[in-house]
Image (cartoon, rainbow, N blue to C red):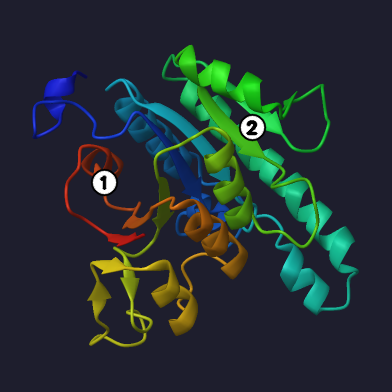
Amino acid sequence: MSDSDCHSGSGPVFNRVLLKLSGEALMGSGKYGIDPEVISGFAEEIVEVQKLGLQIAIVIGGGNIFRGISASARGMDRSTADYMGMLATVINGLALQDAIERFGVKVRVLSAISMHEVAEPYIRRRAVRHLEKGRIVIFVAGTGNPFFSTDTAAALRAMEIQAEIILKATKVDGIYDSDPVLNPGARRFEHLTYLDVLQRGLKVMDSAAISVCMDNNLPILVFNLTRRGNIRRVVCGEDIGTRVG
């Protein structure tokens, strides 16, 4: 794949991005776990855009295996539940690493919790160096702290590595004023400010993540991951999804 695959003919409009993937996206049509075909499809798309010359970091969630906040709501200690959720993200990160490397691209998994046998420790300078060397970097274990979501981890890591934008991959094609699944007349926003998201209580990312992005003027683009080719469309500058910022 070459730069000419961007419709503009000038290659990607970004140099370095952070892609936020939910754990639920890996389930496909299942109710739990990882669908091998789905994760392979995501991996192929990620490799395609990386070959355009883009530096890609990924933060991955763990909701397909374990969701800490749900477990705490059922009586489990919140810190314990969140740590278990962090471990779920490590499983997903290793699965995505394996899927991407099957396409011949080098990947490094960096964990906020020390587990040297399976992942490198998160060190900011090391992460940036991997990106500069053309490797895809996957950040796992959230921030390493309970009470913070992987959305917040995505915002923090994006700032630390100086990503130009957070690409928030979802199952819908942007942000709506109500749930488009339940309300066929729901209206999609093309652009929102950070305050719009916070004041309207829109479920894009949690308020801590939005606040980090707002304080640092880091844009967020919410788009539909399930449509093949959308990651390339986003990085090539096509007007899809909803932009926050």
Q: Quadrant of residue 7?
A: top left
Q: Nearer the viewer, residue 55 or 33?
A: 55
In space, the residues marked 1 and 2 are separated at their CA atoms by: 23 Å
Residue 154 locus on image (x, y percent): 56, 48
Quarter that holds the N terminus: top left
Q: Is label 1 or label 2 in front?
A: 1
Q: What residue is shown at x 44% (from left), y 30% (from top)? A: 56
Per the rendering, the mark at residue 181 is none
Asked if residue 201 shows in the view, the reply is no
The crowding category of the residue bearing disc 2, from other C-alpha atoms within 10 Å (few below 14, some 14 to 19, many at least 20), is: some
Name the spot of residue 186 as percent of width and height, x first.
Answer: 27, 84
Taking the spot 91% from the left edge, 69% from the top edge, the residue there is 77
Q: Residues within 10 Å of mark 1 (few under 14, many from 20)?
A: some
Placement of the C terminus among the 4 image quadrants: bottom left
Dot 1 amino acid type: Asn
Q: Amino acid at mark 2?
A: Leu
Residue 38 in the image, given as x and y percentages of width and height: 43, 44
Above or below for 144 versus 163: below
Q: Which residue is mark 1?
A: 230
User: Compared with residue 199, is residue 119 higher up or lower down, i.e. above or below?
Assistant: above
1 or 2: tag closer to the N-terminus: 2
Which label belongs to residue 94? Answer: 2
**Element carrying mark 1:** helix
The residue closer to the viewer here, 15 or 103, is 15
Residue sitting at 50 percent across and 33 percent down?
A: 57
